[in-house]
């Protein structure tokens, strides 16, 4: 079943005469230049907001977006002499939808960036290289090659009673709104997204599906493509070539793509007929951009839904506490903003894996030195091996060992440029800094005293792989982490080996804990996850719980083997409440305890945070600047009831010879914090950071890590 391709819109030929008109254009002006809005230019005719143009900026020629004219600036008469003329207009392309401009304007205001910087950062980079004529040619080629998607209708699973109830609730909701779909891994959430998307697409609308990291789950993309025969499914993520990314983006904007599946950047995909936004694994930290405009794609998806009047579906087995709070009814102390639908049972009736805790304090030291695996866990792995089942062993630290040390003196393999150790990578015998990238061959002897006996301390995945291979003779051990998957295609190849049953034990970082649907895995082990229990970041336990629940969800996905599935955790704190909740697979009570703790500590979701970060050559310089801008805002902070905490160094305070400091801001009211930040912006710019020796500063609103 195909559909006809509508002709591309053809713009009327440009009239080259007539009086010049003033046009506001968003161009990528740096935040620090103080230009918050769009710049004024002269055009030969009126241009619709959202039209892409090329404009002069200083001595350069840049891409820009015609911006909705703010009412206030109409009063000021254009001074043609002072304004510069646009260079090119991308006539062949329909203007970006008004809702796109609104979302960008909102995000720029909320995350304290200029509209132009944000707009240009979220457009496909390839656009910047093209002239109007070149883009028109690309469009013509794209259109000529556009074939009606084929595909056979798939063998559809009948929705379970819980899925049917959720679908019914979604189909009959009175207003679009936000829905949290809470259900453990394998409870059939993705099936609900697929059905909802099918309904929306059948009604002639486009569906937007956000996922944390597409390259980790190529399976998911295949599942979507298979489920939409005769429809066009495109992906948007950083793994695409620039040309391909532009092509997919164009298909979205032209309305040719029925379904857009993408990572956080896709929240800005221009969709003229958007009818649904899904955010899968909504708790995943990768939805937060960590540089430039530090936006949360999950939060912007909610805003976008409101702006466009379309429903938003957030799905997770372990929702972020912010989302959980929003989805708790007011009667239960929640915010009651979102609707909540739950899927309790695993599809096929399988049970979640039994959780086994190994108390490491009872394992003799000598034994720990020989093998990282406690005897009972080793026996369980051997049992899986004998039965031809697969196991995942998860350790969140790559490399061979986090540090090398000298057995004679106190030398350790620290990084000369960072306040961090360099990690020992045995495969190429290097010491590598994971913060700045500084890398050297391992020295033959201690650089400090000449002792040839330098030894690894602790372990990473590389060493664990080696130790597992020797502890399990005959087992086929493989490893997936950022080091083994750097080469393009390597991850896919390793995953394929795993799916084909050519691997018995897969070792890896959190990359292996994410959404993979490994059918033969019946044992998952976390080797040493305790650090996050006592992390300086208040979200440490929340993160750890989500990660362990997600890891547990990799075991027993095949209902026939689910009965024997196990999740093992080696811990020094088996009595910790987090592990008790994990054993019971009880997200709800874990979340409640955490939310109560956050309430008494004045932390999100009961308070709203922002960070101001400053980088300088020395820690005192960075902190002094932060203190100065805090002092300058005392009256404002008092008025808005925003608390400004003293500047502190970051936990890794020096990276690449740059000292990093930050200052936390907290408020019980989000609007008050927003008003404060907006007013504070001028102060930040006035205090000329460059003149004070500050290299960079950045505001992070709703920071994920503090
Ligand atoms: P989740 O997204 O919650 O992890 P999925 O939607 O991926 O769950 O479902 C888990 C597995 O169960 C998948 O293999 C999926 O194809 C299958 N599945 C989902 N819903 C049904 C159903 N109603 N009937 C049969 N199989 C189903
Ligand atoms: Zn030494
Ligand atoms: Zn370094």
Image (tube, helix red, strand yellow):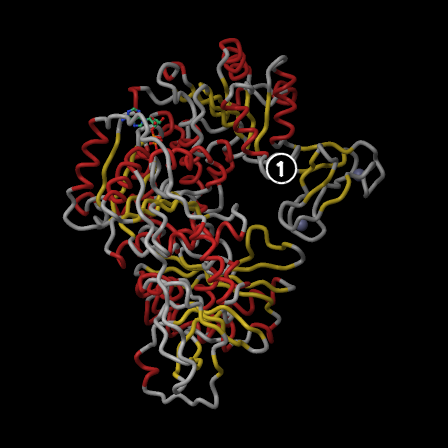
Residue 670: quarter of image: bottom left
Image quarter where the N terminus lies is: top left
Residue ID for mark 1: 483
Out of 285 and 204, give the one closest to the viewer: 204
In the image, taking residue 222 as reference, residue 413 lies left or right, namely right
Q: Is residue 168 left or right of residue 312?
A: left
Q: How crowded is the residue under tag 1: few (<14 C-alpha within 10 Å), some, or many (20+)?
A: few
Q: Is residue 48 above or below residue 705?
A: below
* Quadrant hosting residue 576: top left
Q: Is residue 674 left or right of residue 83?
A: left
SS class of the residue under badge 1? loop
Vertical side of 565 occupied by 396: above or below: below
Position of residue 490 measured from the top left corner of the image (x, y, whole percent) = 59, 34
Spot the residue most to the top. 386
Q: Position of residue 130 (x, y in %)?
A: 53, 64
Q: Is mark 1 within 8 Å of ligand 3?
A: no
State the residue at coordinates (54%, 69%): 625
In percent of width and height, residue 407 lies at: 76, 33
In this orientation, which residue lies closer to the viewer: 223 or 564?
A: 223
Relative vertical location of residue 362 with respect to residue 308 in this rendering, above or below: above
Residue 468 placement: quadrant: top right
Find residue 681 and report its horizontal and vertical position in percent: 44, 72
Q: Residue at x 76, y 44 (%)?
A: 440
Residue at 63 percent across and 31 percent down: it is 459
Residue found at the very far right of the displayed protein:
450
């Amino acid at each position: 079943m195909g559909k006809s391709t509508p002709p591309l819109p053809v713009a009327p030929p440009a009239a080259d005469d007539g009086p010049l008109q003033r046009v506001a254009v968003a161009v990528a002006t740096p935040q620090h230049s103080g230009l918050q809005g769009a710049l004024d230019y002269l055009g030969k005719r009126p241009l619709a907001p959202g039209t892409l143009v090329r404009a002069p900026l200083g001595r350069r020629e840049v891409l820009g977006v015609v911006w909705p004219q703010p009412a206030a600036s109409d009063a000021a008469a254009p001074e043609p002499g002072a304004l510069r003329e646009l260079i090119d207009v991308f006539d062949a392309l329909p203007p970006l939808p008004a809702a796109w401009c609104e979302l960008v304007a909102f995000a720029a205001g909320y995350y304290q960036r200029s509209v132009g910087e944000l707009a240009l950062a979220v457009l496909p980079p390839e656009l910047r290289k093209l002239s109007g004529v070149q883009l028109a040619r690309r469009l013509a080629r794209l259109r000529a090659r556009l074939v009606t998607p084929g595909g056979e209708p798939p063998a559809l699973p009948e929705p379970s009673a819980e899925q049917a109830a959720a679908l019914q609730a979604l189909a009959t909701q009175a207003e679009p709104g936000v829905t949290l779909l809470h259900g453990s891994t394998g409870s059939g959430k993705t099936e609900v997204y697929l059905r909802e998307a099918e309904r929306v697409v059948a009604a002639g609308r486009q569906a937007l599906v956000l996922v944390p990291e597409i390259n980790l789950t190529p399976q998911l993309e295949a599942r979507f493509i298979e489920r939409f025969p005769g429809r066009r499914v495109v992906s948007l993520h950083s793994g695409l070539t620039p040309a391909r990314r532009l092509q997919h983006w164009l298909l979205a904007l032209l309305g040719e793509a029925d379904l857009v599946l993408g990572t956080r950047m896709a929240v800005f995909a221009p969709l003229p007929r958007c009818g649904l936004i899904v955010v899968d694994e909504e708790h995943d930290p990768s939805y937060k951009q960590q540089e430039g405009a530090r936006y949360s794609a999950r939060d912007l998806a909610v805003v976008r839904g409101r702006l466009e009047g379309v429903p938003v579906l957030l799905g997770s087995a372990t929702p972020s506490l912010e989302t959980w709070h929003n989805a708790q009814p007011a009667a239960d102390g929640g915010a009651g903003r979102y609707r909540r639908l739950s899927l309790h049972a695993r599809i096929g009736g399988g049970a979640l894996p039994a959780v086994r805790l190994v108390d490491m304090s009872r394992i003799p030291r000598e034994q720990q030195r020989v093998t990282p695996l406690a005897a009972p866990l080793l026996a369980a792995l051997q049992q899986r091996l004998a039965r031809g089942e697969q196991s995942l062993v998860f350790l969140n630290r790559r490399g061979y060992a986090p540090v090398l040390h000298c057995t004679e003196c106190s030398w350790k393999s620290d990084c000369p440029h960072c306040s961090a150790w360099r990690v020992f990578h045995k495969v190429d015998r290097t010491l590598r800094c994971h913060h700045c990238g500084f890398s050297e061959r391992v020295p033959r002897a201690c650089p400090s005293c000449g002792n040839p006996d330098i030894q690894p301390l602790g372990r990473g995945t590389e060493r664990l792989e080696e130790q597992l291979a020797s502890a399990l003779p005959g087992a086929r051990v493989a490893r997936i982490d950022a080091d083994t998957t750097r080469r393009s295609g390597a991850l896919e190849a390793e995953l394929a080996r795993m799916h084909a049953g050519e691997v018995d034990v897969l070792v890896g970082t959190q990359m292996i804990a994410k959404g993979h649907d490994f059918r033969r895995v019946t044992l998952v082990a976390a080797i040493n996850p305790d650090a996050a229990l006592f992390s300086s970041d208040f979200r440490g336990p929340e993160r750890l719980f989500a990660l362990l629940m997600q890891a547990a969800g990799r075991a027993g996905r095949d209902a026939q083997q689910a009965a024997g599935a196990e999740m093992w955790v080696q811990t020094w704190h088996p009595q910790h409440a987090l592990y008790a909740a994990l054993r019971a697979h009880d997200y709800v009570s874990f979340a409640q305890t955490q939310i109560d703790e956050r309430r008494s500590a004045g932390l999100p979701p009961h308070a709203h945070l922002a960070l101001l970060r400053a980088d300088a050559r020395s820690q005192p310089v960075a902190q002094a600047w932060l203190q100065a801008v805090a002092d300058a805002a005392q009256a404002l902070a008092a008025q808005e009831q925003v608390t400004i905490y003293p500047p502190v160094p970051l936990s890794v305070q020096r990276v690449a010879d740059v000292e990093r400091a930050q200052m936390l801001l907290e408020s019980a009211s989000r609007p008050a914090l927003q008003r404060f930040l907006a007013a504070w912006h001028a102060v930040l710019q006035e205090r000329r950071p460059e003149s004070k020796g500050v290299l960079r500063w950045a505001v992070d609103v709703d920071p994920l890590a503090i």
